[in-house]
Image: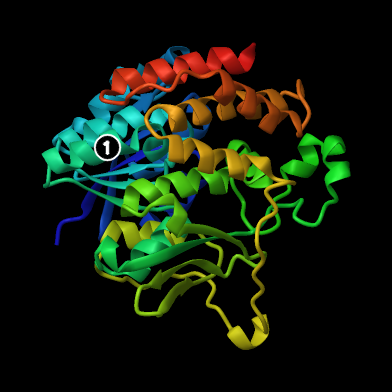
Amino acid sequence: MSPKRIALLGATGSIGSSTLKVVRQHPDRFQIVAAAVGRQWEKLLPILEEFHIPVAAVYDADAAQALSKVYKGKILSGMEGLLALVSDSNVDYVLNGLVGAIGCNPTLEAIRHGKTVGLANKETMVMAGALINTTLKQHPESSIIPIDSEHSAIFQCLAGRPAEEIECIELTASGGPFRDFPKEEFKNITKAAALKHPTWVMGEKITIDSATLMNKGLEVIEAHYLFGVGFDSIRVVIHPKSIVHSMVQFRDGSLMAQLGSPDMQLPIQYALVYPERLLLDIARLDLTEIGKLEFFAPDTDKFPCLRLAYEAGRRGDTAPAILNAANEVAVAMFLDEKIAFTDIPKILERVLGKASIGPLNSFEEALAADAWARDAAKS
């Protein structure tokens, strides 16, 4: 069996790092033939050298130029470089671990070129889920396999069952570092405190999203488009230990759950070899040591971002793209310590309140909504 030839987008992030661990365990099964990052070329360089990767793309033009001076492989830049990477005939599989709206267009391009996409970039489905699904129907040889731990869990629980058999999807959430904080103390939350996630090690943006529960809100929208389930049939359940990664309630009363250690290597490898399962060297669960599993309802009064995500999802059309773009701007401002933690949902609510929600029939319309929302959030 020839190794699966992978284009790894977001190679230096947390998803990329976990993917590299999987590839190291199974060098006979996987070969990274292309890698991409936003701008961190210094971190990409040792990856290119270790895996002898012939092609790389760096979104930032200056960073791409710097990399080209020290690496002899082919170096691409900009969105054109990302699109060229995923459409290359030498690539079998695109693993999209990019963060933010930048990951949407490469997903579309990969689908148009008949690739299987392992999707960890939730913004793809949030920004243009309906458009992605239309494109998948036009290219039935392509497919998306979710990599987010929650959506991978749902995918595993469904095991190919049709959407009409689903009564409810239950997305688990750790609740982040502030689940037990009193609401009146939220205004004093610091960047350092918000970046201390209790169970997962992730990039800064997704860690802040987890602290506000916006990450779970984006996952609700993503689940709607991935699995064809209405928003009234998607519940969020707080599960602090992050052992149960999500559940599916079927119409016959069966509740299926996927459990595992909080390690992204598992959903990544599953997405790479589906429907096969390979040996994976990660920690195993011992339920006798865990003792008990706790579940709670989320508090949308303390965490209004989750409520706003449901509202945007139900409005549909360009509303999710507007929410996502405004959130990216607000989180960036919080990380730059220009706004308070409690300002994030305030900005999102104001942007959604003044937005003119339009139809989403093309990627250009998604981009226009994204651009408008970024300007509105900044102002």
Q: Position of residue 96 (x, y in %)?
A: 36, 41
Q: Position of residue 93 (x, y in %)?
A: 24, 46
Q: Is residue 79 left or right of residue 300?
A: left
Residue 1 or 349: which is nearer the viewer? 349
Q: Is residue 194 visible?
A: yes
How dense is the environment of label 1, judged by Cα within 10 Å: few (below 14), some, or many (20 and up)? many
Q: Position of residue 285 (x, y in %)?
A: 55, 78
Q: Is residue 69 visible?
A: no
The kind of residue on which mark 1 rests is Ile
Quadrant for residue 250, please give it: bottom left
Q: Is residue 153 left or right of residue 286?
A: left
How many numbered markers are drawn?
Answer: 1
Instruction: List the residue tagged with mark 1.
Output: 132
Quarter placement of the C terminus: top right
Residue 207 or 342: which is nearer the viewer? 342
Q: Position of residue 8 (x, y in %)?
A: 35, 41
Quadrant for residue 7, please give it: top left
Residue pushed farthest bottom? Answer: 288
Q: Residue at 71% across / 28% down in the picture?
A: 334
Q: Residue at 12% across / 46% down in the picture?
A: 140
Quarter placement of the N terminus: bottom left
Tag 1 secondary structure: helix
Q: Residue at 66% across / 80% down in the picture?
A: 290
